[in-house]
Amino acid sequence: MAKKQFKAESKRLLEMMINSIYTQREIFLRELISNASDAIDKIYYKALTDDNLTFNKEDYYVKITADKANRTLTITDTGIGMTKEDLENNLGVIAKSGSLAFKSENEAKDGHNIIGQFGVGFYSAFMVADVVTVTSRALGSDEAFKWESEGADGYTITPAEKDAVGTEIVLKIKENTEDDQYDEYLEEYRLRAIIKKYSDFIRYPIKMDVKTQRPKADAENEFEEVQEEQTINSMVPIWRKNKSELTDADYENFYNEKRYGFDKPLKHIHVKADGAVVYNAILFIPENTPFDYYTKEYEKGLELYSNGVLIMDKCGDLLPDYFSFVKGMVDSEDLSLNISREMLQHDRQLTLIAKNIKSKVKSALQGMMKDERENYEKFFASFGRGLKFGVYNDYGMNKEDLQDLLLFTSSKEKKLVSLDEYVSRMPEDQKYIYYASGDSIDRIEKLPQTEMVLDKGYEILYFTDDVDEFAIKMLMKYKEKEFKSVSSGDLGLDSEADKQENEAEDNDNKELFEAMGSLLAGKVKSVKASKRLKSHPVCLSTEGDVSIEMEKILKAMPNGQDIQADKVLEINTNHEVFQSLKTLQADQDKLKLYTNLLYNQALLIEGLPIADPVEFTNDICKIMV
Ligand code: ADP
């Protein structure tokens, strides 16, 4: 019979995985057991809600059988089984959602990483087996089918015999090679250890025939070896256990077993609530950003159990958008089993649980910021952007909840600071929280506008994320201190006397500035003497709500809004260039040349494009000859 080919991307992935030196081969068993357990969940749930199905708890189990002579390892489950189409659709394709297309070639070379991203659980069997045979009979069907594959070159599906509903997976374990030992996956002690390590909390018995010594019935002090079926896992779900019984490693295992992520979580939160609402939850704060986190494809949510039975994979209503990164599960006895998605939204219990979870996560993050700063900074590097969007979204409705979780790079030591840390170390005479925006820290540091503020000994927050300034505009103030951009018209640094002096200076040079202003009509609102510049001849500042960075971001958006910042060209009157400007008033051509040059320089400093670069270079040539 002709072999069917795996879908193209599956084939590539499979080859990569088989050939990758995956250090923890043993996880194949966790993956297969976890699939089996999911399949039992499905049938168990059906039985609970379908009156026509009767069930006995004892009927649901996973059985592991090793046969050394034939080098086979068999994983049998009494789950929901698969139809012919299921076998085709589930086992013929990896990365079903086409998520593979997301990955760059480079990343795809690393098979390990791929396993992590997609949880291609079933295929991990090929790390230890030459041939994988899946025989399955689906619930409600009286025929069974056999799927068989020797790896990357394809698979066959043929009719088969199977008495009971469920799935049997037979792995033909590879022969040992010089470098790799596979025999261990046929050893009872080894299999037992792997099951204990990864699958201890699986809710159904994982059974294995084990050899034990038993006292002989007819002779005293003599033992005989017998084979008996034992349940290897302890079965109590981790969330029902006492926190004191559990170690960090237990939580980490649970996180991996559940495929919440393949990183190591930065923190776990174990909630046992028995107040107004009764529930258990285990929540995780991951370390790495899922590859699709900042796309529409990413789906937030927690697993929702009703009294130990899974009722929903991803209950989005349990998490606010800005905490979308949280992984984990909630188990509540108060929820009805056959609750629908629509009903859930209006469920009072669920709303209470969600509220509770939100505050647990918030205080866990605050605790981390305080006591585990390094971890918090890792977290913030992965998910901070989402928090800032949270401040900005919904008209700032959640800003109070989120403002204390924000971090920004500060001019002081280039370290991350929270707003609270910034405000609490402000000198007494400082009125505002200063910030500067730009593409990178390096670029911001070179902005002439920062000189004066830094000179005063004030700290500046560096905004390098698109969303930063928008979020801050939404906050407006933190602890009664207003935010101020170093590029804004009035920096609030001048005393009354300074102000008068500035005005006088602007007056003295009124004619020159007006002449320059009209040469730049439509480009800047006005030209002024600058008080913020020390060594640079010019810079741009802005008046009004839209800053230059915001203008850039709005322009770059797909629906490209052409919103302009009200720009002011500031001239450093202490600079030599200004002295030569003053001599030019009679020479209109030269004044125009210099004005354009200065304006274009200011644009360059801001990282804004010059309207006519050819003219600009020609202008430079003019002053060179
Ligand atoms: P994942 O479990 O991450 O979806 P897998 O490649 O491990 O990916 O499995 C693909 C699909 O095959 C599963 O989602 C499930 O629908 C089906 N499947 C795998 N193993 C079993 C099983 N033992 N019983 C029933 N269905 C299974």
Image (tube, rainbow, N blue to C red):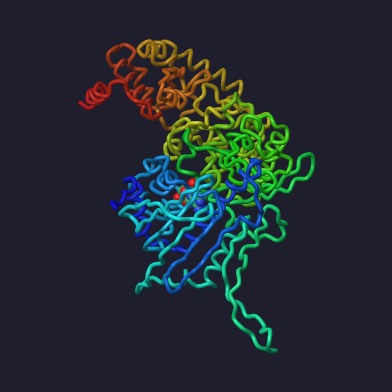
245 vs 427: above or below:
below
**Residue at image point 52% right, 37% down:** 299
Visible residue check, residue 374: no
Depth check: give the residue in front, 554 or 360.
360
Q: Nearer the viewer, residue 523 or 255?
A: 255
Q: Residue at x 69, y 36 (%)?
A: 350
Left/right of residue 308 with respect to residue 611 in the rendered view? right
Determine which quarter of the picture holds residue 568.
Answer: top left
Whole-percent x, y for residue 435 in the image:
54, 32
| x then y, percent, for residue 466 | 47, 31
Q: Residue furthest left?
A: 625
Residue at 56% x, 64% y is 195
Question: Residue at left 44%, top 14%?
Answer: 525
**Above or below, 224 relative to 580:** below
Residue 436 placed where, x, y %? Answer: 50, 32
Q: Nearer the viewer, residue 295 or 336?
A: 336
The quadrant of the image that shows the C terminus is: top left
Asked whether, in this view, residue 306 is left or right of residue 11, the answer is right
The image quadrant of residue 590 is: top left
- From what the image shows, is residue 391 above or below residue 200? above
Res 194 → quadrant: bottom right
Asked whether the viewer can see residue 79, the reply is yes
Q: How many numbered marks does the figure carry?
A: 0
Taking 443 as reference, is 580 above or below it?
above
Apparent side of residue 86 relative to residue 246 in the rendered image (left or right):
left
Task: Give the farthest residue toward the right.
Answer: 275
Q: Nearer the viewer, residue 70 or 392?
A: 70
Give the x, y percent position of residue 273.
75, 45
